[in-house]
Amino acid sequence: MQQYLDMVNYVLENGVEKSNRTGVSTISSFAYFYKVDISKGYPLLTTKKMYYKSMLHELLWYLSGENHIKNLSKKTKIWDAWADDEGLLETAYGRFWRRYPVPETGHLPGENWKTQWTTRDPETGTLVFDQIQFIIDTLKEIKINPNTPNLRRMVVSAWHPGNAAESKLPPCHYSFCFNVSGNKLNCHLTQRSGDIALGIPFNLACYSLLTMILAQECGYEVGEFAHTIIDAHIYMDHIEGLKEQLTRTPGPLPTMTIANKPLAELTFEDFELKDYEAAPKIKFGVAI
């Protein structure tokens, strides 16, 4: 996609050098924004070969709500470096998507935390809120009640301040919001930190696919995916690889078909990527 190449070029030309926790400096730009029309094709980069299977396993892991990598690591090792010896991940995106903790006591006057989406966590017994189910139910309600109060409140947060203050790696893509325009479902992702060479292509593919899943589940057409990256950066050892990518011309986007099943029943085999032709892979190292 040209939008991705434009971002690479912009950060290379306008970014400033910054040091960070990894010890590998970056070229960084503040608050980069782009969007793509998902209805024109599945936005999987064609200017380098993408290993989309890892991304799909990761997305299904998010949607499972698990906070450990025991099942995920059988398919992909992308989270192994940040888990503890027992496979637990202190900041697991899906744990907050599906089991966001809510307080039982200490409410301020006028607050009510108990809703139809609040249940007891089967592991801990604490109160949790299922943000994904809230989105699904709201999208279905909009179909019959366009004036639903939750129309502009379809926000999912993976950010818990207490967790983030102590986590080895707090969420990078920490909040996303859905928007209905006519019969099209759009998604906007906000990301505090984005590795342009490695992370952003996965984030783009992941959240576009999530939008496609929810659109199909709730009876919408797919619209646009929009993305704001607060610290959009390129690691110094990624520069040459990205310059190589800039010499390549984007090809036609592939398509993704999803089995007509409820989200809770979808498995890896229910997704089929078609007509994906990409340029050769480019090796980028991971800064941990």
Image (cartoon, helix red, strand yellow):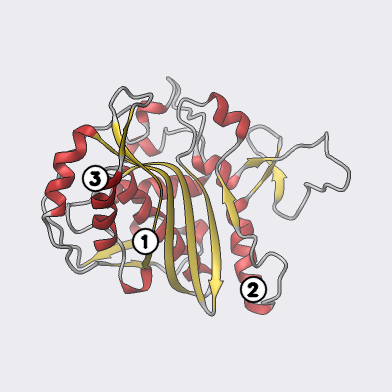
Looking at the rendered image, the quarter that the C terminus falls into is top left
Q: Nearer the viewer, residue 264 or 18?
A: 18
The image shows residue 204 at horizontal and vertical percentages of 36, 55
Nearer the observer: mark 3 or 2; the answer is 3
Residue at mark 3:
12
Quarter of the image where one finds residue 137: bottom right
Per the rendering, the mark at residue 142 is 2
Per the rendering, the mark at residue 270 is 1
Question: Dot 1, how many residues are within 10 Å of its Cα: few (below 14), some (14-19), or many (20+)?
Answer: few
- Residue at 19 percent across and 59 percent down: it is 46
- CA gap between label 3 and label 2 equals 42 Å
Question: Type of residue at label 3?
Answer: Leu
Question: Type of residue at label 1?
Answer: Asp
Of mark 2 and mark 1, the one earlier in the sequence is 2
The image shows residue 36 at horizontal and vertical percentages of 36, 65
The residue furthest right is 109
Looking at the picture, does residue 144 appear above or below residue 84? below
Of mark 1 and mark 3, the one earlier in the sequence is 3
Nearer the observer: mark 1 or 3; the answer is 3
Question: Dot 2, how many residues are within 10 Å of its Cα: few (below 14), some (14-19), or many (20+)?
Answer: some
Quarter of the image where one finds residue 149: bottom right
- Residue at 24 percent across and 45 percent down: it is 12
The image shows residue 238 at horizontal and vertical percentages of 20, 37
Q: Do tag 2 and tag 1 residues touch (Cβ < 8 Å)?
A: no
Of mark 3 and mark 2, the one earlier in the sequence is 3
- CA gap between label 1 and label 3 equals 39 Å
Total number of numbered discs in the rendering: 3
Q: Nearer the viewer, residue 204 or 190?
A: 190
Quarter of the image where one finds residue 205: bottom left
Looking at the rendered image, the quarter that the N terminus falls into is bottom left
Question: Dot 3, how many residues are within 10 Å of its Cα: few (below 14), some (14-19), or many (20+)?
Answer: some
In the displayed structure image, the side of residue 272 where residue 190 appears, left or right: right
